[in-house]
């Protein structure tokens, strides 16, 4: 009787653990890197990739974007990621959120750039 109870509890624990295993694909919040220009990264999160990859993608996107000037846009893939930027601008700054995807991998960062 005791062994059946133990088996039942173990099975229930395994089911609960498996139900939380799906959380592995949830976004992970990372420490934003130092901004290379005049401004700063305000957030960085990754899904199905590492924070170090997220840092590389954010910095590579910055480099691509400013190659077209301080207010420039990046119109090509960055380290194999396709990126889409949403921005709000005023005369003195740009506030933007960038989502970069590569298959099921995702890197999302935001930045504030002085212009």
Image (cartoon, grey):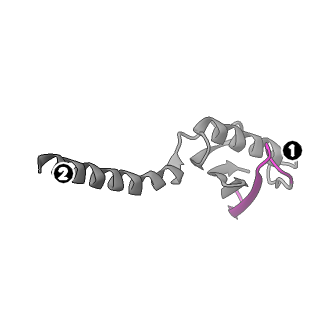
Quarter location, residue 51: top right
**Residue 102 — which label?**
none
Q: Are marks 2 and 1 in contact (CB under 8 Å)?
A: no
Q: Is residue 93 visible?
A: no
Question: Horizontal and vertical percent for residue 28?
Answer: 51, 47
Q: Nearer the viewer, residue 100 or 43?
A: 100
Left or right: 27 as drawn, with respect to 54: left
- Disc nearest the viewer among 2 and 1: 2
| Disc 2 secondary structure class | helix
Reading the image, the residue beneath label 2 is 4
**Residue in the image at 76% along x and 41% along y:** 60
- Magenta range is 76-94
Q: Position of residue 105 (x, y in %)?
A: 66, 51
Q: Residue 43: horizontal and vertical position, in percent? A: 56, 48
Residue in view at x 62 percent, y 43 percent: 49
- Was residue 81 drawn as part of the magenta stretch in this picture? yes
Q: Quadrant of residue 38?
A: top right
Residue furthest to the front? 1
Q: In the image, is 74 to the left or to the right of 9?
A: right
Drawn side of residue 93 relative to residue 42, left or right:
right
Q: Quadrant of residue 36?
A: top right
Q: Which residue is mark 1?
A: 67
Please state which of residues 1 and 89 is positioned toward the viewer in this rendering: 1
User: Relative to residue 59, is residue 10 depicted above or below?
Assistant: below
* Image coords of residue 27 (percent x, y): 53, 52
Residue 49 located within the stretch drawn in magenta:
no
Tell me the residue at 76%/46% (across/down). 61
Instruction: Residue at 51%, 46% (x, y): give it.
Output: 29
The answer to whether 52 is drawn above or below residue 76 in the figure is above
Q: Looking at the image, tell me whether mark 2 or mark 1 is earlier in sequence order.
A: 2
Residue closer to the observer: 80 or 67: 80
Label 1 Cα neighbours within 10 Å, binned few <14 / some 14-19 / many ≥20 = few
């Amino acid at each position: 009787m005791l062994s059946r109870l133990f088996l039942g509890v173990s099975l229930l624990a395994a089911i609960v653990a498996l139900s939380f295993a799906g959380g592995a694909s949830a976004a992970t919040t990372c420490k934003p890197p130092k901004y290379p220009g005049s401004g700063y990264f305000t957030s960085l999160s990754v899904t199905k990739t590492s924070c170090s990859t997220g840092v590389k993608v954010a910095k590579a996107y910055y480099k691509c974007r400013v190659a077209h000037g301080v207010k420039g846009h990046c119109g090509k893939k960055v380290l194999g990621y396709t990126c889409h930027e949403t921005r709000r601008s005023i005369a003195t700054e740009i506030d933007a959120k960038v989502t970069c995807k590569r298959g099921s991998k995702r890197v999302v960062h935001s930045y504030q750039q002085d212009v």
